[in-house]
Amino acid sequence: MRLQPPQQGRLSIGLDVGGTKIAAGVVDADGEVVERVPPLPSSATDQAAMLRTLSAVVEELRTRHPGVVAIGVGAAGLVHWPEGRIRTAPNNTYRDLPLRHVLQDSTGLPTVVDNDANAACWAEYRKGHSASYMAFITVGTGVGGGVVLADRLFRGRTGIAMEIGHMIVDPHGGERCGCGNTGCLEPLASGPALGRYGSAAAAAEPGGMLATLAGDPAKVTGETVSAAALAGDPGALAQLERLGGWLGIGVATLVNLFDVELVVVGGGVAEVGDPLLAPIRSHFARFVTAAGHRELPDIRPARLGPEAGWIGAALLALDQEEAGTA
Amino acid sequence: MRLQPPQQGRLSIGLDVGGTKIAAGVVDADGEVVERVPPLPSSATDQAAMLRTLSAVVEELRTRHPGVVAIGVGAAGLVHWPEGRIRTAPNNTYRDLPLRHVLQDSTGLPTVVDNDANAACWAEYRKGHSASYMAFITVGTGVGGGVVLADRLFRGRTGIAMEIGHMIVDPHGGERCGCGNTGCLEPLASGPALGRYGSAAAAAEPGGMLATLAGDPAKVTGETVSAAALAGDPGALAQLERLGGWLGIGVATLVNLFDVELVVVGGGVAEVGDPLLAPIRSHFARFVTAAGHRELPDIRPARLGPEAGWIGAALLALDQEEAGTA
């Protein structure tokens, strides 16, 4: 325990800007949550309205927490670093939005804007795990992630590194990806992919648990599959095995390239736990190179859940501000 | 031009230890070749003989070049960093050889031992190209490479990062890899793969140039295919297109993950030039994510040829020694 932590009293606002909602709150320098606000609707089509919402949340939180010294934003899409310019986001209409500049100007506070999966990766690193070389993969509507190398978040030259969902794992098969390509990991390993696998399984077995739970095979979602799997349904478990198999293949490539000591798996789909983690681990062990000649990294579940995005963004801002580079 | 370069007169010995031969020489701090020795045979089975050869070369070069202050070795296989311990090498019998320790003890000189593709990557970075974020891929008997991030060679936690040949690109098809897995890039994109593609093409067209050049379809090698391609044979060009396609897919994943500004392609197979580079570029452009929303990195041929390994190893040793960390 530090008697006089240098960051004592310093707080940071975190914002996670998604396609449909904005999550936000305040953390201290240890990443402890000081306040969280109820999720706010995010307008996918009205950029001005979205910016007004962000400003209002920031002002409200600053009023209640005078110790706030920085703002961090995690945003879906390609975010250029360190400019914090959102180049493109799949579920929002904004294009080339200089969000960092806008927020810094309107609030006067040092601000960082990073990719949402990078922010979540940083939260898992700072709060959940202690590995200097750590990959994070998040499985939800999409597949994303980040990596910490030598205790620093890796961003590549312009901030758009670690597009984990777009590793090419099946170039001549596979579904078309939201990015327009085929062969990407995302359309084989995301929540919607799990729903698709579940729909096909339900259609093939109309009296099975998946079809019964959803009412209609076409209505099976990733959540249906997870619920059925947790109830022990073999058909649902097989779909998670398939999804986890693809993720394990992706993790093998990540480890072959980055030589990390830990892989953390988060996101909504991963909340099902072992039915997904077990096939990730087994496929990883089968596909990683030279498995017999190296120490294999652990593959562990994320610890922070859906709050990782805004908590990580807030911590990134504070860590950056402390380093004097924000 | 520096009038008094701090490294003036400082020389370094570089050694490239492969499965069948050892290449070696001396460079100055700018990477200029001061002397190169004719390639020496390397014993794949007799570790003591291999170490005697290395020591003899080092002693001989030191005698002629008193300015030598460091030794660098590039070695095939998994090499732990910074210990310079060769964990395993596909074409040598040594296992867990602490080569850095052995050479440092016997010569009294600061020594670094790194993976041969890492060493070649460093040579291309230091001598050939000026990109702070640069990936290097070498296509020969195997497929390997390295990456420079923020002007530093990236090695991962233990030195075994960047196993580019073992990215999983075709998990449910593809040939078995030398590493024992299936789905790796290497068996689809190496020199032997090119020979295999060429053999099949020659068997399908017994009167074609490939079959004629090799005498027997089974005798077609990667070199045969390259020679026929340079003579304009459409059948040979199609095989390089296939090989380059797989490499382009691998490069897309690398760029999606590392966000580099430059990709350099080297190794014996790449010496054929455009017939391989063109399909790498086209497949890369097709498979990289968000191509319309980013600046695409250049894909350029390597500049140093087969000497990149020992030159890069020598430079790594000198750069390391200069930084005071060898």
Image (spheres, coloured by chain):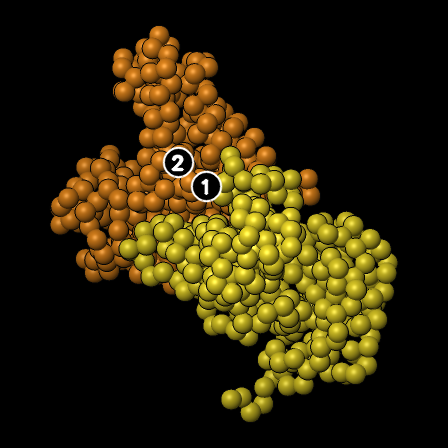
Chain colours: A orange, B yellow
Amino acid at circle 1: Val
Describe the element under mark 1 as helix, strand or loop.
Answer: loop
The picture places residue A49, in percent across and down from the top left corner, at 13, 46
Q: Nearer the viewer, residue A80 or A63?
A: A80
Q: Nearer the viewer, residue A324 or B86?
A: B86
The picture places residue A56, in percent across and down from the top left corner, at 17, 46
Determine the residue located farthest toward the bottom in the rendered image: B3
Q: Which mark is residue A174?
A: 2
- In the depicted structure, whether residue A175 falls above or below residue A221: below
Q: Which residue is mark 1?
A: A169
Q: Is residue A234 left or right of residue B36?
A: left
Describe the element under mark 2 as helix, strand or loop.
Answer: loop
Total count of labels = 2
User: Do the residues under discs 1 and 2 have CB atoms within 8 angstroms?
Assistant: yes
Question: Do marks 1 and 2 both belong to one polypeptide chain?
Answer: yes
- In the depicted structure, whether residue B162 falls above or below residue B299: above
Label 1 to label 2: alpha-carbon separation: 9 Å
The picture places residue B252, in percent across and down from the top left corner, at 43, 52
Mark 1 chain: A
